[in-house]
Image (cartoon, rainbow, N blue to C red):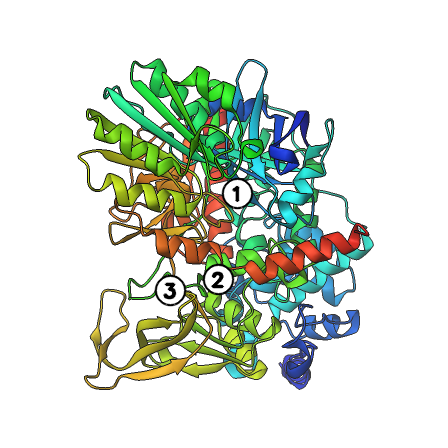
Amino acid sequence: MAETAAKKAKKEKIPRQAMPEQEPKVRARNFEEVPTGQSAEAAMQEAARCLQCKKPACVAGCPVEINIPAFIQQVKDGDFTAAITTIWETNALPAVCGRVCPQELQCEGVCIVGKKGDPVAIGNLERFVADYERKHREAKPPEKSEPTGKKVAVVGSGPSGLTVAGDLVLKGHEVTIFEAFHKPGGVLVYGIPEFRLPKEIVFSEVAGLEKLGAKLECNAVVGRSVTIEELFEEGYDAVFIGVGAGLPRFLNVPGENLIGVFSANEYLTRSNLMKAYLFPEYDTPVIQGKNVVTLGAGNVAMDSARTALRLGADTSRIVYRRSRDEVPARGAEVHHAEEEGVDFHFLTAPTKFFGDEKGRITGMEGLKMELGEPDASGRRRPIPIEGSEFELECDLVIIAVGANANPLLTQSTEGLKLNKWGYIVADEATGKTSKKAVWAGGDIVTGSATVILAMGAGRDAANSIHDYLTWGW
Amino acid sequence: MFKIIRREEMAEGTVILNEIEAPLIAKKARPGQFVILKANETGERIPLTMAETDPEKGTITIIYMVVGKSTALFRDLKVDDGYQDVIGPLGKATHLEKVGKVICVGGGTGVAVLHPITRALKEIGNDVTCIIGARTKDLLILEEQMKAASNDLRICTDDGSYGHHGFVTQVMQEVLDQGGVKLVVAIGPVPMMKAVSNITKGYDVELQVSLNPIMIDGTGMCGGCRVTVGGKTKFACVDGPEFDGHKVNFDELMLRLGSYLDDEKESHDHYCRVRGE
């Protein structure tokens, strides 16, 4: 008894190891990654804080159920190669998840250590292990089962598609990933900025999948270049649809088509995928506003507002119609944005945009809001305050208020049941759609959500596809 | 890589034709659809409506005017060189229907886009009068092909060096005045399409135009290509590229096409410096 207490006291003495970061003023002007990564010593120190719970809440809190205590023990023992092997058992993209998962709502949110202090930094440890392996290449790739002779088409190379491909290729199936863009990764590449997720990491994870035997076809717009029916005619036995939400929402207020009003999708795609921040070395330009307004307060809005600073903005404002309590972005993202100088304007909503004779935006008009009763989303509904109009000068507006379902693929596929918003109806546990041998997962089923939830859906679908290919529908 | 197997220069070298190996696109493409091309790793994604497709040979043909950095980069690709990326077919195909008397109006490289549509309209039994124009005789493209594709070809030049001395709209109005025209298809520079629209609004005809706004992905994902049609915002990439020419807000389209004029100049100058020009 005395010994356990002493052990516990010792553990409590180790504070949560901070992740080193670039200085806010410096990083707000470059595209390099904000957190710079931990040393092996710091990682081992952090791992020593884990209580190795018998019934680990963290595992249950993880959408792909990584064996968290096991890999943390391996980090504590300094066996980083064993740790990556443990993570790989259930997660093909740890370098990505360690960076972009909302850990505070998942594994770390339920960590027992966190009840009386800071939780174990599980995300940072996952990232450390993945980065260590990428640098040292010591681990053996997971074992592949005997070839089954079955062919699977994965439509979309975002987080859900990559997870399905990774799981099924290990189970011995022949997997081809179809990507509409010229580069794989989906939102990981076009949406999430370099300073939060270096693209080299995504490409390295995809290269790993290719090494395992997954085939990748870029520039393939399923629904246009080839239809789902044609994939079956070509001999595919099963199809997974993970195309993302991908149709930007606009606000339908006057002046929205002025030059300098972007969807976040366009703004971020120009900057991230097309590398407009390296213009003119790269050919794609993007408008570099001096006074930038981003509408919305999700992770995509934070990415946009922070990108604007890095592209040279003097002011970068977030305009959000609800209050700070309703902000949907991760706490860490809001914190980083504020540190870098992004201004938050809560309880404000745009009513119109103004332009000059060249059709370029020069400002916007907004209204102050107050919060009323909760709406369908459970959040308190913003209500305009009469006579509270105000004007804001700006030369760039980024609309980051979410996405709708892109109909390009769903409209070209017969027998695929959609809900009233155009998202694909899929079984929650398996991802099975109303069409035989077709599964779906990620944002095209749930609407805009997170990388890890899409990966969880991919994991479930992969298991169900494997069952189908083994036993039948 | 998508290999170039044929390359021609037209209109005194200002317009280039590339026939490109792209068997999957060639098999699928129908008149009116477009592709997105990217020359190399650092290149821009450029949408161009296809001028020709040959499913048997497995090739598509694009015809474009050299106007900036990206098209200059395309121009510098030789036979056996290739585009790093070609994506398509994208957009909706032209709605083809037998309606009777049709006028097809083309200007600049719009003539290249108009060609397969004209041919298809004639093939299904329409009586097609085609009117194409250029600033001067030497800048005119595809005269022979357009002659073969239509029942009657009229040519206009701004300087009177060939055919009718004046604009395509003047000849179009003459044909409209003869009566019986049901449909006008106009593809060319935005000011031309706007001028056509202003005239056809006065007649009982439908007007179909094909738009080529700035876009990135071509699949409805970025919304950069939005155009106002009948007071509503449409995405040219998935709702178009063809629209009812009487409802398009051409002034807005023209402004939006100028979004990056300064950047385009900077990019082109940068390219010329790199090439030592």
Q: Residues within 10 Å of mark 3 (few under 14, many from 20)?
A: some
Q: Residue at x 39, y 29 (%)?
A: B131
Image height of A257 relative to B217, above or below:
below
Tags 2 and 3 touching, CB below 8 Å:
no
The part of the image, by quadrant, that contains residue A365 is bottom left
Q: Image check: A428 left or right of B138?
A: left
Q: Nearer the viewer, residue B199 or B33?
A: B199
> Which residue does the numbered mark 1 point to in the structure image?
A161
Name the chain letter of the residue that bears numbered label 2. Answer: A
Image height of A108 relative to A405, above or below:
below
The part of the image, by quadrant, that contains residue B104 is top left
Q: Quadrant of the N terminus of chain A?
A: bottom right
Mark yes or no: residue B270 visible. yes
- Local secondary structure at mark 2: loop
Q: Position of residue B82 (x, y in %)?
A: 69, 32
Q: Nearer the viewer, mark 1 or mark 2?
A: 1
Which amino acid type is shown beneath numbered disc 3?
A: Val
Q: Residue at x 32, y 81 (%)?
A: A347
Q: Nearer the viewer, mark 2 or mark 3?
A: 3
- Local secondary structure at mark 3: loop
> Which residue does the numbered mark 2 point to in the structure image?
A61
Q: Residues within 10 Å of mark 2 (few under 14, many from 20)?
A: some
Mark yes or no: residue B245 visible. no
Image height of A34 relative to A250, above or below:
below
Q: Earlier in the sequence, mark 2 or mark 3?
A: 2
> Which residue does the numbered mark 3 point to in the structure image?
A401
Name the chain letter of the residue that bears numbered label 1. Answer: A
